[in-house]
Each structure stands twice: as structure tokens, then as C-alpha cells.
Amino acid sequence: MVRTFSQETPFPYPWTACVQAFFLRYPNPQASHVVTVDVLDRHVEQRAPRSPHGPPSFVLCTSRLLLKRGSLPSWAPKNIIKNTEAWVLEESEVDLLPPSPDNSAPRVMSIWTRNLDHTAVLAVTEGIRFTENCVDVPPKAPTQCLTAADVRSQVSFKLLRRRIEKFGLTSYLSHKDTSREGLFWSIQNLAYLLEPSKAMPVLQRAPERSRTRRLLHALRPPFLDGYPVGPIQWVKRRWKRWREGELATRSVDT
């Protein structure tokens, strides 16, 4: 069973800032799992005009290779993956057009990412699209971000395949917010990233990413993410229910 996810989020930042910050978002305090980022190719392509009598459009195409470090759950079979690091291919296209005053042809940045290693065990494909809003309407955010993900496994054992896909989707959702925070960090520090000679502002580390919170997340019981309750947790629940019933009986007797 393939797991999918889709969500549209408003970004309170201009589209141009989102585009620049996306290419400069590594490293950031929220992406300690990203080891390296390398540009493989970058060129400009000419595309068909968006209108019948309009000028040709141009798109900036970029291919980057990222090395990310991950971790395996405790229930994963031994030697299913020898190395938890994985190469990820990122391809993006950015419209090189002037802004449209009437928003008839909004500029768009499209990104596709997919892991190149361990694809038989777990393949995660993500698509992101930043769409510019040129009309100055207060309820409308300057940029709309559409995120979609496809999580699938090719493990032959059906029960294990379902559990791997569920774990992959849960892991993706848990890192989705931190990825957005990393992009926001990059946008807020865009002036420094473009010109490092400027003073670096003081950054407040997000409380949910503190060492204590990371440790608690690492020790998070798997049953909280939808997995079956283990024998230890089952005994603890039965003991708790017995204690509650014993205390209730004593209070009635007294």
C-alpha cells in the first residue's frame, strides 16, 4: 500500500525571497542530518510562450546532489540497510519572468527530490511548488507552497512492507515542519547569506528542537505512531488499570 501526502501552506514571504532562500537553506540549525550539498548542473532552458502572442519564457534548471544521514527503527531487520546515509537527487525549475501585475501568469518554482539509495526498501519522492501571488489582497499570502509526497517500499514481505511505508510516512511528516523552519531561517537571514560581511543576527533556537526534545523524540514509543503495542507496554497498561481499580475499590470501602 503506497502512502501519499499533500498539503498547501501559505508563506508570508515574497516569492523571490523563497526562491533565493531555498538554494541557500543548507546549512541551517534545523538540518543537522544534511551532510553535503553539491550542484551537478545548472542551465537556462527556453520554453514555449505562456500566451499565443507572448514572448518565449525561460526557466532556470538546477540539479543538486544531497547526502543525508538517517536512522533505522529498532524493529527493522538486521542488515536490511548496511549504511543509513543516502544520496538524494534534487531537481528544480524556476521561472525567469517579470512579475505579472494581474497575476495572470504567476511565477512558479518547482522542486522534485528522491533518494537514490535503498530504493527497494524505501523510496520517498517529494514535490514542492512555490507559486507567486502578485495581487495585493490582504487575506492572500505572497507565496503559496504546495507539498506532495509519495512513500513506497518494494519489500516482498507484505506485513514488513506496510510497516516500512508507515514508518517512512511518519518520519517524513515529523521532519516536514523542521524543513519549513529551516527555510524560514534562511529567508530571515537572507541578507547575511548573500553578503556574509554583514553582521549575523542573534538566532533563537526553536524550543522544540532542543537537546531534551530531540532525546524525548528519539525515545518516543513506537505505539504512539500507530504501531502495535509491545509486550512491555501491554503489561504496563494492565498494571495501571489494575492499580486504578484497586484504588477505586479501597475508596468505596472507606
Image: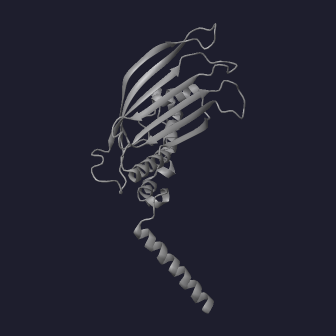
Name the image quarter holding residue 117.
Answer: top left
| Residue nearest the observer in this picture, 7 or 210 | 7
Report how many numbered discs are placed on residues in the image: 0
**Vertical side of 253 occupied by 100: above or below:** above
> Residue 18 at what x, y percent from top left?
54, 29
Q: Residue at x 36, y 47 (%)?
A: 156
* Picture colour scheme: one colour
Q: Is residue 153 above or below residue 50?
A: below
Q: Position of residue 30 (x, y in %)?
A: 45, 43
Q: Is residue 82 left or right of residue 97?
A: left
- Using the image, determine if residue 223 lies above or below residue 131: below
Name the residue rendered at 54%, 36% in the picture: 147
The image position of residue 60, as x and y in percent, is 48, 18
Residue 206 locus on image (x, y percent)? 50, 48
The C terminus lies in which quarter of the figure? bottom right
**For residue 197, what is the image quadrant?**
top left
Q: Is residue 254 visible?
A: no
Residue at image position (61%, 92%) is 253
The residue furthest bottom is 254
Q: Is residue 119 above or below residue 59?
A: below
Who is closer to the viewer here, 52 or 136?
Answer: 52
Q: Is residue 90 visible?
A: yes
Q: Nearer the viewer, residue 217 or 146?
A: 146
